[in-house]
Image (cartoon, rainbow, N blue to C red):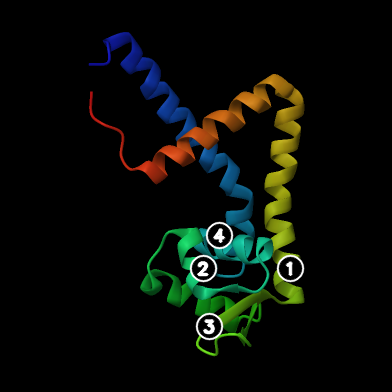
Amino acid sequence: MIDLKRQAELHAAIELMFHAYRAFTAPPDAILAQRGLGRVHHRILYFVARNPGITVSALLGVLGVSKQALNAPLRQLVDAGLITTSTSDRDRRSKLLDLSTTGLALEAELSGTQMARLDALFQQAGPGAEAAWREVMAALRDSAQRGPAPMP
């Protein structure tokens, strides 16, 4: 059982994470809203930009969503001319995704706001703080892949 003092500290950490994530996503969210798009669209653009020619199946795995959840936002991005699709030469059933020139520019603007914020904050906090943050974020990511933490 987590003692009461530690519970208060952990509740404060949860609140910090919630508010930090909201601050981190606010600038791209505002840019997306002007286009009638949302955070899910940014995630798709981001991972297609990092993985040109990614298959829809691979993108589903990266995002950890169902085909049904991806279908509508991906279709919106294709219809808006931000993502292009092509058929794989190796497997005609596979659809390959790439960003169009417009999609590349939008993704760079969206992620650019976040990179600038992280860069400034990491410089302010110092290399030790950045390394510790990366370690915590990697551990959090890895723990999610292992499944839920056991209850104390």
Badge 3 crowding class, 10 Å Cα cut-off, few under 14, some 14 to 19, many 20 or more, is some
Q: What x and y, as percent, mark residue 2? A: 27, 15
> Mark 2 against mark 4, which lies toward the viewer?
2
CA distance separating discs 3 and 1: 22 Å
Q: Earlier in the sequence, mark 1 or mark 2?
A: 2
Q: Which mark is residue 104?
A: 1
Earlier sequence position, callout 3 versus callout 2 = 2
Look at the numbered disc 2 and give the secondary structure of its residue: helix
Residue to which mark 3 is pinned:
94
- Does the residue at mark 3 contact the one at mark 2 (Cβ under 8 Å)? no
Residue 43 is marked as 4
Task: Point out the tag, 2 or 4, that comes first from the N-terminus.
Answer: 4
Which of labels 1 and 2 is toward the front? 2
Q: Horizontal placement of 3 versus 14: left or right?
A: left
> Mark 2: few, some, or many residues within 10 Å (few <14, many ≥20)?
few
Which residue is drawn at the image coordinates 33% and 9% (left, top)? 5
Q: Residues within 10 Å of mark 4 (few under 14, many from 20)?
A: some
